[in-house]
Amino acid sequence: MKIKITAEEDVVVARLTARKASTAAGFSLLDQTRITTAVSELARNIILYAGQGSMECSEILSHQYGKGLHFVFSDSGPGIADIPLALTPGYSTGGGLGLGLSGTRRLMDEFTIVSTPGTGTTITITKWLGRSIC
Amino acid sequence: MNRCSILLMHQIIIVVLQGDMDDHSVKQIQQKALDRIAEANAPGIILDVSQLDTIDSYMVRVLTDLSRMARLLGAETVMVGLQAAVVMAMVEMGLDFKEFKSAASIDWALEQLGVAAPKGRAGEN
Amino acid sequence: MTEQTVNLPNDTLLDIYQTWLSGLTNTRWVSSGAVSAKECEYLGTQLIIHFRSSLSQNSLSKELLSILEQITKTGIQAGLSPTETATFVLSLRGHLSQICTKDQGELAHQLLEQTALHTFEMYVKTREEIINQQRRDILELSTPVIKLWDGILAVPLIGTIDSRRTQQTTEKLLNRIVETGSKIAILDITGVAMVDTLVANHIIKTAAAVRLLGATLIITGISPSIAQTIVHLGIDLSSVVTRAVMADGMELAFDLLEKKVSSK
């Protein structure tokens, strides 16, 4: 399922979509909250930094971990010039206009980011049902 | 769109936040809350977040801003109703509400703000 | 499993059922006594009906998958192995020619194989889910949160801490704080064998979470060797209140509670 993220209201839609999908997949309340928080953060980033983009959500299966929920956030915004910097813990967390990327990464099991300045950014996150969380 | 409500109790403003707020309704709520604080000359404001099933960095900033504005008007902020799952996700993300206190119940929040809780209230503690 | 009445198909197929079903009674499905003959008949007839409709649409139909799920669950509950469970499906092989038309023959064999494999996989997955649920239940029991006093909760951690248990404990503690409106939580690690960076990080996270809820976390039961380990590892627990012995923790808790109650 794919939704366009072009306005603020879409962040709410993204959250609701994530909540519904994670409940349907059978995640615990805690994991559902982790997922919706990560989704909310990334969807908001698109609005803040790229203006518009999209989010794709799908259920996936793996031999090792069983069922999982997979999200892809993409935009054709300005991109992130210094990815390692953006991923350092404490980089604009909480208080300011934070990218919250490092925090989001901690909430999920898998996190990949591909970004080219001037072209756009694609972030994928995954959470597995069968994996023990730290 | 904005179903947040603002109550006045014992001179304290209570803002009940809803989960589907966008930037526009946020600004509305901030304005309304501050107006009511000024009107009532309230010494405190309680933020009820029990309806929020997700709190991300944006929400943290919004609420922190509100508490700063309230403080300028002479009102202290106490937060009530944080859900356990939300707290854990926040801690993992590295989010914190450094600037104001939290309480597990409205009664306790009122106590923290220096207002005696009414007698005969159904036990929340 | 509730008994349901099944519309028996026309007479020509009746023979198949009898032969096939009587064949089943030689398997553990009936000989183990865990599954009644009536249940077998119900599952079997459903299987054949939906298998035939799957044949005509050339894929495993939704109804077929659903009956496979039932067969799997029944097999697990009866204590049958994955192979024995799949045997239920495979035993249809000898009767395929009676169920389908001649030109469907090849397809029927393929579909039967697919069906049996699916049953096998489903068994494994379902059993895993059951085990996970049991594990969660055990964890639930082994992490008690005790109400020491009005407003004071205590959690004793015992044994080796793994991240899952710590998280479970924190979750439970937070929920109880919200439920009871407690202002103090005492986490006692006297019974903990070893503290490493991972455990220490969990403790710090727990303290932060408790603070977010407006309560205070006190950690008690820190032995001299744990104190050494913590400092050696360079872990900063300065934001957390700690005490060596549980009794001191409780004393502190009462002090704090008094202060909280009497102060403005």
Image: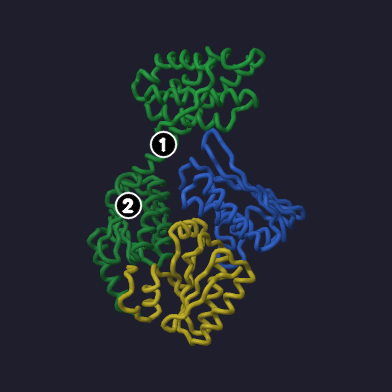
Chain colours: A blue, B yellow, C green
Tag 1, which chain? C
Can residue A113 be seen at all in this image of the molecule? Answer: no
Q: Quadrant of residue C42?
A: top left
* Image point (51%, 81%), residue name: B71
- Report x, y in % for residue C171: 40, 54
Residue at disc 1, secondary structure: helix
Distance from Cα at disc 1 to Cα at disc 2:
37 Å
Tag 2, which chain? C
* Image point (52%, 32%), residue name: C66
Indicate whether B38 appears above or below B5: below
- In the visual, does C93 lie left or right of C105? left
The residue under label 2 is: C226
Quarter occupied by the N terminus of chain B:
bottom right
Residue at disc 2, secondary structure: helix
Name the kind of residue labelled 1 in the image: Ile
Indicate whether C215 appears above or below A88: below
- Report x, y in % for residue B28: 61, 75
B116 or C153: nearer the viewer? B116
C258 or A37: nearer the viewer? A37
Q: Residues within 10 Å of mark 2 (few under 14, many from 20)?
A: some
Q: Residues within 10 Å of mark 1 (few under 14, many from 20)?
A: few
- Report x, y in % for residue A61: 57, 37
- In the visual, does C68 lie left or right of A117? left
Name the kind of residue labelled 2 in the image: Ile
Count of numbered circles on the image: 2
* Image point (41%, 31%), residue name: C3
* Image point (40%, 14%), residue name: C26
The residue under label 1 is: C130
Q: Quadrant of residue A10?
A: bottom right
- Report x, y in % for residue C51: 57, 24
Can residue A97 be seen at all in this image of the molecule? Answer: yes
